[in-house]
Amino acid sequence: MNVAENLASIRENIEQACRKSGRDPQEVSIIAVTKYVSIETANQAIQAGIKDIGENRKEGFLEKYNELGTEATWHFIGTLQSRKVKDVIDQIDYLHSLDRLSLAKEVNKRASEKIKCFVQVNVSGEDSKHGINPEEVIPFVEKLGNYEHIEVSGLMTMAPQTENEDLLRGCFQNLRKLKEQIQNLQLPHAPCTYLSMGMSNDYSIAVEEGATHIRIGTKLVGKEF
Ligand SMILES: *Cc1c(COP(=O)(O)O)cnc(C)c1O
């Protein structure tokens, strides 16, 4: 795995997707998902120019954070059990997996300042996926106004594992429409400017459909374990 080469080719694909859709590549942040790689490989990504790191489990997150903490912006992208919130919340810059009120309540209680959150949406409706059902997202976001330490920075989704481009595109478009509906509400706690969507196999489509944060593991840093 040559992380710098991988990054160059991902950046080219982002530029191409932006040209197609009339977007500015500067609007797209690449989050290196390092859950399957060592601290050394995560560090290589940073040396290659990556500024954002994503982890999906408390242990992996803290391990990388404790070594590389000051050198990156930290994204927690996996399901977070409420009892683990206190161990990570003050290290996290963005929480991508806010998917229930009990979690919001715990984050609010444990955080010492406002936490930037993405509300995770189960756009595809697959049982295996975490996230709020699309029709419940707006009432959920409205309720989050009760928690002073929660800011709804955006929405996040995981698309289904499929090669069907229309299905993927539809999924990303639906998330974008929801984001626009929330922005139109002009809620002070929910600027909702970001869309966290797109992974190794579907990030080009996600960028064409408006992704501001793509979460890439395998195609950027590979899989070591
Ligand atoms: C693992 C993971 C990714 C990255 O997946 P790849 O297919 O390896 O790019 C992105 N988002 C979440 C939430 C993940 O758990």
Image: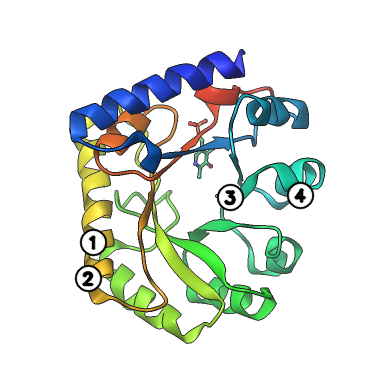
Residue visible at 68% across and 66% down? 85
Q: Secondary structure at mark 2?
A: helix
Indicate the amino acid at tag 3. His
Tell me, yes or no, if residue 164 can be seen here: no
- Can you say which quadrant of the picture contains the N terminus? top right
Indicate the amino acid at tag 2. Asn
What whole-number distance in Å separates the C-alpha atoms at marks 2 and 3? Answer: 26 Å
Q: Which residue is mark 1?
A: 180
Indicate the amino acid at tag 1. Glu
- 125 above or below 146? above
What whole-number distance in Å separates the C-alpha atoms at marks 4 and 1? Answer: 34 Å
Tell me, yes or no, if residue 107 can be seen here: yes
Q: Which residue is mark 3?
A: 75
What whole-number distance in Å separates the C-alpha atoms at marks 3 and 1? Answer: 23 Å
Q: Which residue is mark 2?
A: 184
Which of the two marks, 2 or 3, is nearer to us in this view? Answer: 2
Q: Are marks 1 and 2 in contact (CB under 8 Å)?
A: yes
Q: Secondary structure at mark 1?
A: helix
